[in-house]
Amino acid sequence: MCRNIRPLHNFEPPATRDEVSAAALQYVRKVSGATKPSQANQAAFDRAVAEIAHVTEHLLAELVTTAPPKNREVEADKARARAALRYAR
């Protein structure tokens, strides 16, 4: 998985449209190999981002879990701790 795409399921509060769109954008960038598409490809790129964001919103709405919702701040602290260990020299 692309490191920039973060899990969006089972958070309180739920993922926002902006978070879903950002994940879709990162996915399309990764798959296409382009961070900024050419003018000839811009429409296809934008359409792909919109469609993936739309499908992702449906997926997140339909997923079911019995686990308690995660806290964004706690998860961010865990990620920072993992990064500190990984990059400590």
Image: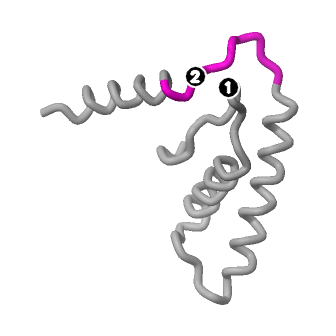
Judged by its main secondary structure, the magenta piece is loop
SS under mark 2:
strand
Quadrant that contains the N terminus: top right
Asked whether the residues under the numbered discs 2 and 1 touch, taking CB atoms below 8 Å apart as contact, a structural biologist would say yes
Q: Which residues are magenta?
A: 64-73
Quadrant that contains the C terminus: top left
Q: Earlier in the sequence, mark 2 or mark 1?
A: 1
Q: Quadrant of residue 40?
A: bottom right
Q: Is residue 12 above or below residue 37?
A: above
Left or right: 84 as drawn, with respect to 82: left
Residue 54 forms part of the magenta stretch: no
Q: Is residue 6 above or below residue 38?
A: above
Q: Is residue 56 above or below residue 69?
A: below
Numbered circle sitting on residue 30:
none
Q: Is residue 23 above or below residue 76?
A: below
Q: Quadrant of residue 69?
A: top right
Task: Identify which amino acid the numbered label 1 is placed on.
Answer: Glu
Q: Quick one: label 2, few (<14), some, or many (20+) residues within 10 Å?
A: few
The image position of residue 49, as x and y in percent, is 72, 63
Seen as rendered, the residue at the extreme left is 89
Residue 67 forms part of the magenta stretch: yes
Residue drawn at point x = 77 percent, y = 45 percent: 56
Left or right: 9 as drawn, with respect to 3: right
Q: CA distance from mark 2 to mark 1?
A: 6 Å
Residue marked by disc 2: 71
Left or right: 85 as drawn, with respect to 58: left
The image position of residue 60, as x and y in percent, is 79, 35
The image position of residue 37, as x and y in percent, is 58, 78
Task: Identify which amino acid the numbered label 2 is placed on.
Answer: Asn
Residue drawn at point x = 72 percent, y = 33 percent: 14
Residue marked by disc 1: 12
